[in-house]
Amino acid sequence: MAAVSAPSASTLSSPSLRTALPTRPPSIRFGAAPRPLTLRLSQGARPARRLAAAAGGGAAGPDMRETLDKVVGAHKVVLFMKGTKDFPQCGFSHTVVQILRSLDVPFETLDVLSNDALRQGLKEYSSWPTFPQLYIDGEFFGGCDITLEAYKSGELQETLEKAMCS
């Protein structure tokens, strides 16, 4: 029986073993630092609790819709995802985070796993049943597949440039 050696560090870092995005178009660099994402609906409550309170019993009740309008309107790029940008909890969310980071675009994230009312409310708000959900300049852009295709075609970069300049 032949001995099997452990792979070297150079083998593990080879391009064929890394998860790679398609050939990257030129980066978009934006000078403005992202504003922190805050939701202020009641004093002292954590954001997840505030969003749950805003749901008003129904997933996308008027309070939840108003809250989501404020969140997506307050930031140029918002990603509702499973997990956080530093610790995505699904591959699709991870892919969209990688795309946005590769473009050096400032973006905010909200974890839909930490709040069931938010998760259900967003499905109705966007008429999109899955996550992640990307919003650019206050408008729903799409999920992972749409974002990836738009990235490959250059449409995402154009949309982000327009949003950042507006």
Image: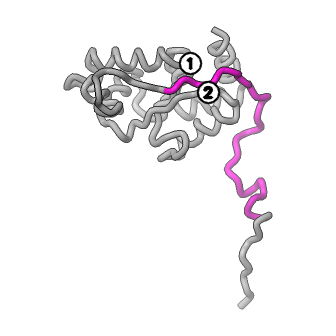
Whether residue 19 is in magenta: the answer is yes
Magenta span: predominant SS is: loop
Residue at mark 1 to residue at mark 2: CA–CA distance? 8 Å
Bounds of the magenta segment: 11-36
Residue 114 percent location from the top left of the image: 36, 40
Judging by the rendered image, the residue that carries numbered circle 2 is 106
Question: Residue 41 is drawn in which quadrant?
Answer: top left
Name the amino acid type tagged 2.
Pro
Q: Residue at x 22, y 24 (%)?
A: 58
Q: Residues within 10 Å of mark 1 (few under 14, many from 20)?
A: many
Q: Give the numbered dot on residue 109.
A: none
Is residue 72 or residue 139 the one in the foreground?
72
Q: Residue at x 33, y 17 (%)?
A: 65
Residue 48's place in the image compared with 28, above or below, is below
Judging by the rendered image, the residue that carries numbered circle 1 is 76
Residue 91 percent location from the top left of the image: 54, 46
Q: Residues within 10 Å of mark 2 (few under 14, many from 20)?
A: some
